[in-house]
Image (cartoon, grey):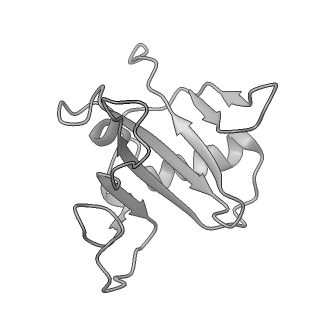
Amino acid sequence: MVQLYNTGDPQITRILSVPPSLTCDKFHTVLQVAFGWTESHAHASRLDEIPANKCSRYPKPPLLYLQPEPRSSGLGFSGNGGTDPLDEADFSLADLLEKKRYKVTTRLRYEYDMGDGWERIILLLGRGDEG
């Protein structure tokens, strides 16, 4: 399920059926079609740790920060343990949502049109039949 964040009422949500092997760059294309967008803005994905204390005012940096064909900024502060963004084409949805290391304690966010701060939260509802 993909839910637009902070859109008010009604919530804007899409339920999509995609293979877990789908890479994040391909998932970006699926989202463009599902929401009727036109590939006209920059995007990025981030895997955030859900804080044990939900009242925490200081969120941790993302565990992973993914972009299309990232370039090193040399600044080393944009996630991935203090490294630069990683290439979204190198990660599948299964890598991010099903690996034991990340499962249950993380949230996948997809940001499109960074200037307006449109965030989507990606939730894994379950696996469908292989057919």
Locate residue 103: give its quadrant.
top left
* Residue at image location 34% in from the left, 30% down from the top: 53
* Apparent side of residue 49 relative to residue 13 in the rendered image (left or right): left
Q: Which of 54 and 47 is in front in this view?
A: 54
Is 11 above or below relative to 36? above
* Residue at image location 49% in from the left, 45% down from the top: 109
Q: Where is residue 8 in the image (x, y as percent from the top left)?
A: 78, 32
Outermost residue on the left side: it is: 101
Q: Position of residue 114 (x, y in %)?
A: 63, 64
Is 17 above or below relative to 111? above
Q: Where is residue 48 in the image (x, y as percent from the top left)?
A: 37, 45
Is 93 above or below relative to 125? below
Outermost residue on the bottom side: it is: 74
Q: Nearer the viewer, residue 56 or 9?
A: 56
Q: Which of 49 and 84 is in front in this view?
A: 49
Quarter that holds the C terminus: top left
* Apparent side of residue 126 relative to residue 16 in the rendered image (left or right): left
* Apparent side of residue 64 relative to residue 114 in the rendered image (left or right): left
Q: Position of residue 62 (x, y in %)?
A: 35, 53
* Residue at image location 49% in from the left, 51% down from the top: 26
Locate residue 87: give its quadrant.
bottom left
Quarter that holds the N terminus: top right
How many marks are shown on the rendered structure?
A: 0
Outermost residue on the top side: it is: 129
